[in-house]
Image: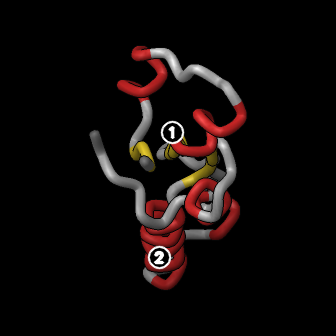
Amino acid sequence: MQHCPNCQSLPYARLGGLFSYGPDLDAMWLRAVGMAAEAMRGKPVGKIPFEQPTRIGLTLNRETASIIGVTLSRELLLRADEVIG
């Protein structure tokens, strides 16, 4: 499993939410820096494409699922970037 320490919604699962699913902020910042560097090298801003996040992290909280009676499938657990509990 790949750990996503800087996913935007990760604190929700760590604080007891059932799951979090959101963009990896580190990946977004790195891409933003790359885009800024292109602009500083003289590339016209209008020529730099707008991009959506490409790395999305899924964190599941197994403890919360157990408390509320939700069974997390094996497939879902294997797809998660992080499983708490």
Q: Is residue 77 above or below residue 9?
A: above
Chosen colour scheme: secondary structure
Q: Which residue is mark 2?
A: 33
Q: Please state the horizontal and vertical placement of residue 57, each as a whole percent of the image.
A: 50, 46
Give the Cα separation between the discs numbered 1 and 2. Answer: 36 Å
Q: Residues within 10 Å of mark 1 (few under 14, many from 20)?
A: many
Most foreground residue, 16 or 1: 16
Q: Residue at x 42, y 27 (%)?
A: 77
Disc 1 marks a residue whose amino acid type is Arg
Mark 1 vs mark 2, foreground winner is 1
- For the residue labelled by badge 1, is the local secondary structure a helix, a strand or a loop? helix
Image coordinates of residue 17 in percent, x first then y, are 68, 51
Q: Nearer the viewer, residue 12 or 3?
A: 12
Question: In front: 5, or 42?
Answer: 5
Count of all numbered marks drawn on residues in the image = 2
In the figure, 32 relative to 37: above or below?
Answer: above
Residue ID for mark 1: 62
**Crowding at mark 2 (Cα within 10 Å: few <14, some 14-19, many 20+):** few
Residue 80 position, x and y percent, is: 43, 35
Q: Amino acid at mark 2?
A: Val
Cβ–Cβ below 8 Å for labels 1 and 2? no
Task: Judge whether 15 appears above or below 85 on screen.
Answer: below
Left or right: 76 in relation to 66 = left
Viewer-closest of 83 and 5: 83
Does residue 41 appear left or right of residue 60 in this picture? left
Going by the image, does 26 lie left or right of 49? left
The residue at the point 65 percent across, 69 percent down is 45
Residue 21, by quadrant, is: top right
Which residue is rendered at x = 53% and y = 65% of the image? 25
Label 2 element class = helix
Q: Of marks 1 and 2, which one's residue comes earlier in the chain?
A: 2
